[in-house]
Image (spheres, grey):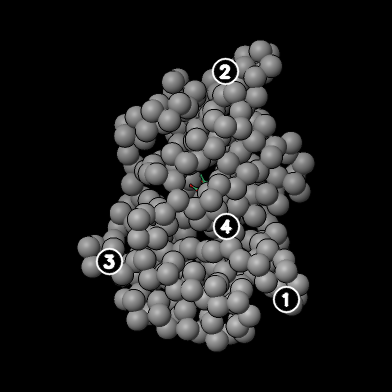
Amino acid sequence: MKVVRKVSELRSVVQQWRAASLNVALVPTMGALHAAHAALVTDARNRADRVVATIFVNPRQFGDDEDLAEYPRTEEADLRQLRAGGVDLVFAPPVDEMYPERFATSVILTGPAEGLCGAARPGHFDGVATVVAKLLLQCLPDVAVFGEKDYQQLLVIRRMAQDLDIPVQIAGVPTVREADGLACSSRNGYLNPSERASAPALYQSLRSAAQQISDGSDVLPAVSEARASILDGGFQAVEYIELRRADTLDNPSGRDGTPARLLAAAQLGTTRLIDNVGLTF
Ligand code: PAF
């Protein structure tokens, strides 16, 4: 497994693969890798002849009051995991390779970037879209894979690639969970033991509300019950719980059997956790 830090090196390896008619999958990450990233790599390997993973903690997607400085940086362990997963090439650029002096361009989205996490984290999805647009254009993969835990991010990236005519398939990979249901996330490492014991309440409550809604219950009471059980479970605040169409994140227009997602964000101690579950509505 080769590790490169410059766009020119990434391009030259990928060009050689292309010349040999090999297709390429991209797995963008911010490092601090865990089981969900391993699942992204496995998915990518099943989709293409060669897999490129990127490790870049993207400063542009962190707000001023967010955890950029504390975000875990574990490159050695990350490279071990990527090597074991069969990644062919890692692109781990320094910040000035991605954002050189006088960098002045941003990708700004409306649509799926509005509301939900976009409401609480202004500029976050523009930062994600900007860095992912760059990574896609730097690598020009056939397919890029993203976890469904960050469901809004997945739709933002899909929209951005379509709107900018970037010729790539954006694939979603189902959320990987711990045995008790907690969605794997680099931020789970911030939880103390008592918060970690409370954390599965988010998924359990979402799952039970989604079940009630698919069984015909009204959305509002099911969501209020989920909100109460997340708080009872030990969370300090529920930022949102919302039912949206799975394909656009628009509000569903009524029960018409369309795939939907129940999405939530909640605060546990100083950690903000997100999760979502799929249902038919
Ligand atoms: O999901 C992440 O880890 C990041 O948001 C991504 C897609 C790698 C962009 O920095």
Q: What amino acid does circle 4 point to?
A: Tyr
Q: Which x, y percent locates residue 118?
A: 57, 65
The answer to whether mark 4 and mark 1 are in CB contact below 8 A is no
The answer to whether mark 1 and mark 2 are in CB contact below 8 A is no
Spatial CA span between label 3 and label 4: 24 Å
Q: Residue 13: give its label.
A: 2
Q: Is residue 64 left or right of residue 10?
A: left
Q: Which x, y percent locates residue 102?
A: 58, 40
The answer to whether mark 3 and mark 4 are in CB contact below 8 A is no
Spatial CA span between label 2 and label 4: 31 Å
Ligand 1 closer than 8 Å to the CB at disc 4?
no
Q: Quadrant of residue 180?
A: bottom left
Q: Residue furthest left?
A: 193
Q: Quadrant of residue 94?
A: top left
Nearer the observer, disc 2 or disc 4?
Answer: 4
Q: Secondary structure at mark 1?
A: loop
Q: Is residue 246 left or right of residue 36?
A: right
Crowd tier of the residue under label 3, counting other residues whose Cα lies within 10 Å: few below 14, some 14–19, many 20 or above: some
Q: Nearer the viewer, residue 111 or 216?
A: 216
Q: Is residue 133 left or right of residue 277?
A: right
Q: Residue 197: give its label.
A: 3
The answer to whether mark 1 and mark 3 are in CB contact below 8 A is no
Decide: is 130 above or below 197: above
